[in-house]
Image (spheres, rainbow, N blue to C red):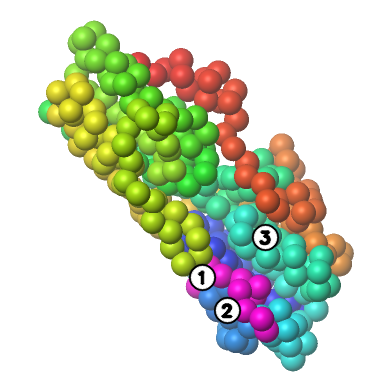
Amino acid sequence: MRVGILTGGGDCPGLNAVIRAVVRKGERHYGDELVGFIDAWDGVMDRHTMPLSVETMRGMLPRGGTVLGTRRGSPFDSDDGVDRVKRSMSDLGLEGLIVIGGNGTLSVACRLHAEHGIPVVGVPKTIDNDVFGTDVTFGFNTAVQIATDAIDRLHTTAESHDRVMVVEVMGRHTGWIATSAGIAGGATAVLIPEIPFDVDELCARLTRRHERGRFASIVVVAEGAEPVPGSLEMEEKVLDRFGHVVLGGVATQIAMAIGERTGFETRVVQLGHVQRGGTPTAYDRVLSTRFGVAAIDLVHQHAWGKMAVLRGEKIIDEDLTVAVGKTRTVDMDLYEGVAKYFFA
């Protein structure tokens, strides 16, 4: 078969490992010809491609980012977008398209299949671990490890200076990274989007901790965390061109409040996009490889409208419709039943 591949949305450790796995099994086992689209859906609409082969993907397993490039946006953003996708697939002789992305990218793929009959297979990707239908997305483990490494280092400098360190991690709608890194790094408190935080309660916790003789605290906050209404004045929200709130900076506002209300010297560390970059962990390399192998198998099964997901220890297929319009939020058994027992 002749099969297209694209990576959409934010970059993520493990993307190249997925592409490599698709190419290797597709070429070596099925005799496929693989075509990569540059810059996500823009590449499909503009017919901007690159050939993919076992040779071109050599050395890509440990490499971060995506060799295909990535971009946000959708064929539905323009009146002729869907027609351009159809023409590209027809003119290039493609029999299927593997779409690697998060909630937005997979929702677009689902709609293209459901409404226009385009043969697509999905692979769930995001460091936020918030795609519904799979137990874990690749990239999440790497992001948590990066955040945990940073927290480990911050403990020593916080202790040396008797400081409170507020660490901002990614997590627009969910606090999976914050919760997992907070547990692994021994955080004093973790603030997540799923539960509005009370800054006075947080300050009381920090004060109790310091009164017990512990003169350093680490507060991990997801970028999308929100305060209880009226408890902390927040800056006015700014939207990007896609209508998403521009995040980043909540840690600074929290740190200022902590300093003002407790008198503790407080510093901010915003990890930002460092969580997306660099070499994927061994776990993410294995998961990405399993997803890629499963995706090309689904193509040959003509299982259009499906995505490869992890359920328990097994890779199975699931309908793309399962992920559309939903966000997989933090398991409260993990947050309330585990993490909170270790908070100050």
Magenta-colored span: 65-80
Badge 3 marks a residue whose secondary structure is: helix
Residue 117 in the image: above or below residue 212 = below
> What residue lies at 75% left-to-right and 49% top-to-bottom?
322
> What residue lies at 36% left-to-right and 33% top-to-bottom?
220
Res. 21 visible in picture: no
Taking the image as shown, residue 167 lies to the left or right of residue 2, namely left
Taking the image as shown, residue 220 lies to the left or right of residue 141, namely left
Among the 4 quarters of the image, the one containing residue 229: top left
Magenta-colored segment: predominant secondary structure = loop
Residue wearing tag 2: 42
Residue 45 in the image: above or below residue 143 = below
> What residue lies at 74% left-to-right and 62% top-to-bottom?
110
Badge 1 marks a residue whose secondary structure is: loop
Does residue 73 belong to the magenta stretch?
yes
The amino acid at mark 3 is Leu
Residue wearing tag 1: 71
Which sits earlier in the primary sequence, circle 3 or circle 1?
1
Mark 1 is surrounded, within 10 Å at the Cα level, by few (under 14), some (14 to 19) or many (20 or more) other residues, namely: some
Spatial CA span between label 3 and label 2 = 15 Å
Q: Position of residue 126 (x, y in %)?
A: 55, 53
